[in-house]
Image (tube, rainbow, N blue to C red):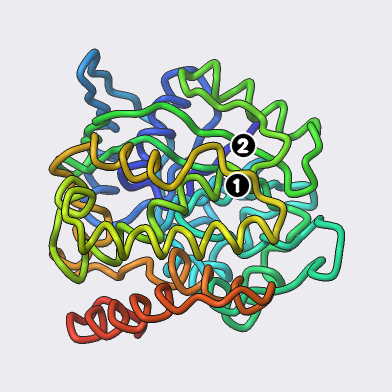
Amino acid sequence: MKICIYGAGAIGGWVGGLLARAGADVTLIARGPHLAAMREKGLKVVSETESFTTRPACTDDPAEAGPQDVVIVTLKAPSVPAQVPRMAPLLGPDTAVVTAANGVPWWYFHGVEGPWRDRRLETVDPGNVQWDGIGPHRAIGAVLWPACEIEAPGVILHRSGDRLPLGEPDGSRSERVTALSKLLIAAGIKAPVRPNIRNEIWVKLWGNLSFNPISALTTATLAQMAEDPDTRAVVTNMMAEARAIGEKLDVRFPMSIEDRIESARKVGAHKTSMLQDLETGRQMEIDAIVGAVAELGRIVGVPTPTIDTVLGLVRQRARIAGCYGD
């Protein structure tokens, strides 16, 4: 199985490093000093329990890699549409594309029965670039739970987590998703095949939707947001609106709102990815995480007054900081 990691930064580098160590035929698409360092010295992965270096194929030109069996896209959601034309050389007739970005995936309504079958989401796929350029038939869903960062060019620091559940949009245990699951598990990644990957997507989205934008507006950590009564009330309202949307879409939430907030509080003085992006001037994943949920609310007829208010504020905050849109 030929696998390409498209966007081999922190998380993608961790996945690619583990696959390479396990002997998989993996190619990393990266750029800049990180790519140069991997070419010169290899890719180093460091965790609390181990440190190892591998030398997978690395390039910034997808045409060098050629058609793949699986492309795992680990770019942030706002970056993906512009990269779709560059992905074309990787896509053979049967290539699967694993979407691992935060938020609602562009293929969300593919393979579902009912009135919203194959509905497109403008917030995450403006102009249907991914739907038309990649194709929903290629999509495999995934949720990346690990926390990683690029400690230095060519060096990935794995802080925590090793879960990467997978799932076909139609819920089937297809040959392709089963084979990929086995390969990732052999590499040391917990990658079970879920019969409803959308449920897993919502578990992570539920927290990201609320804590991420509020942290960008307040600069508060997870613990500070969960422990402050005023902020906690806003988080609770956003989660309640999101749960109402999810339940309209037949999503099952495995815990209460209070338990979900408490799990975030226990993480402690952690800055969300959206706040980190704001502080470092990187593009923020606002539309995939917050805007898409508001769009889903409009589709299923669930009002989202709190989500809409926070969405408008965080978009303005990001625009002023140069971290949103063009």
Q: In this view, does 244 lie to the left or right of 315?
A: right
Instruction: Say which amino acid is labelled 1.
Output: Val
Instruction: Say which amino acid is labelled 2.
Output: Leu
Residue at image position (43%, 33%) is 15
User: Does label 1 or label 2 sit earlier along the sequence?
Assistant: 1
Number of numbered labels in the structure image:
2
Query: Label for residue 153?
Result: none
Q: Are marks 1 and 2 in contact (CB under 8 Å)?
A: yes
Image coordinates of residue 138 in percent, x first then y, are 73, 53
Residue at image position (52%, 56%) is 62
Mark 2 packing: few (<14 Cα in 10 Å), some, or many (20+)?
Answer: many
**Residue closest to the eye, 62 or 292:** 292
**Residue closest to the eye, 69 or 78:** 78
Residue at image position (29%, 32%) is 43
Q: In this view, does 25 lie above or below 153?
A: above
Q: Is residue 281 above or below residue 240?
A: below
Q: Is residue 244 left or right of residue 316?
A: right
Query: Label for residue 98?
Result: 1
Residue at image position (51%, 42%) is 143
Image quadrant where one finds the N terminus: top right
Q: Distance between the residues labelled 1 and 2?
A: 8 Å
Q: Is residue 109 above or below residue 72?
A: below
Query: Label for residue 166?
Result: 2
Please tell me whether mark 1 sits on a helix, a strand or a loop: strand
Residue 125 location, quadrant: bottom right
Residue 194 location, quadrant: top right
Please tell me whether mark 2 sits on a helix, a strand or a loop: strand
Q: Which of marks 1 and 2 is in front?
A: 2
Image coordinates of residue 211 in percent, x first then y, are 30, 57
Mark 1 packing: few (<14 Cα in 10 Å), some, or many (20+)?
Answer: many
